[in-house]
Amino acid sequence: MGFLEKLFEGALWNSRFMILTAVVGSLLAGIAIFYMATVDVVNLFSHALHYADSSLTDEARKALHDTTVSHIVEVVDGYLLATVMLIFSLGLYELFISDIDQAHGSKSSSKILVINNLDDLKSRLAKVILMIMIVTLFEEALNMHMSAPLDLVYLGASIALIALALYLTHASEHKAGDDAEPSEKAPEKHGH
């Protein structure tokens, strides 16, 4: 029975390597989104060069300005989404496969990419997703046409709800940091 148990446990433990498909897939999706957002930046810049053209009317210049700002918001949204995919990819790798030595060993590495547990990963992803939602709301607000006073109330309420969400996120982060003992703030991961 010991041999079969050891064989089964070994197969079960090694099944965690299936997560590499999600790690590589997320990384490739992030690279694709980074590429698309960068192409959008290049196209945006080429259109923005026409802003100084003296043949543009004031209305055309205003339209170019508005579309440029809207496209910048879309680019920020794209980069944030690509960042989510990168954090997700790195987090899954650290949680299921192995620590990334460069992330832990270097003083210059970003601590946002060091994932110690599933709650760490969820927290980091939630913050970036919240930022994506804020940018999306900002993009919609830029294109919003106020036709009734109630539209202004809706816009104000959405801004207030975003401010509340940011406040609660920030407050919960500081409360979690204050409640934890110094030894709990940086939990050690045991080798895989």
Image: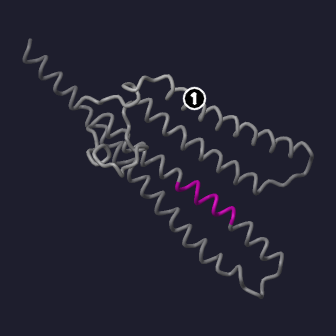
Residue at (40% x, 48% y) in the render: 110
Q: Looking at the image, is 188 positioned above or below residue 59? A: above
The coloring applied to the image is one colour
Query: Which residue is label 1 attached to?
Result: 172
Main secondary structure along the magenta-highlighted residues? helix
Q: Nearer the viewer, residue 183 or 171?
A: 183
Pointer 1: residues within 10 angstroms few (<14), some, or many (20+)? Answer: few
Residue at (25% x, 29% y) in the render: 190
Q: Looking at the image, is 56 positioned above or below residue 112? A: below
Residue 150 x %, y %: 89, 42
Is 26 inside the magenta-drawn segment? no
- Going by the picture, which residue comes out furthest to the top? 1
The quarter in which the C terminus is drawn is top left
The quarter in which the N terminus is drawn is top left
Residue 105 x %, y %: 27, 45
Is 75 inside the magenta-drawn segment? yes
Residue at (47% x, 34% y) in the render: 122
User: Seen in the image, is 10 located left or right of residue 87?
Assistant: left
- Please provide the residue range marked out in magenta: 69-79
Q: Nearer the viewer, residue 147 or 175?
A: 175
- Number of marks drawn: 1
Q: Looking at the image, is 164 positioned above or below residue 75? A: above
Which quadrant holds residue 4?
A: top left
Residue 26 x %, y %: 40, 47
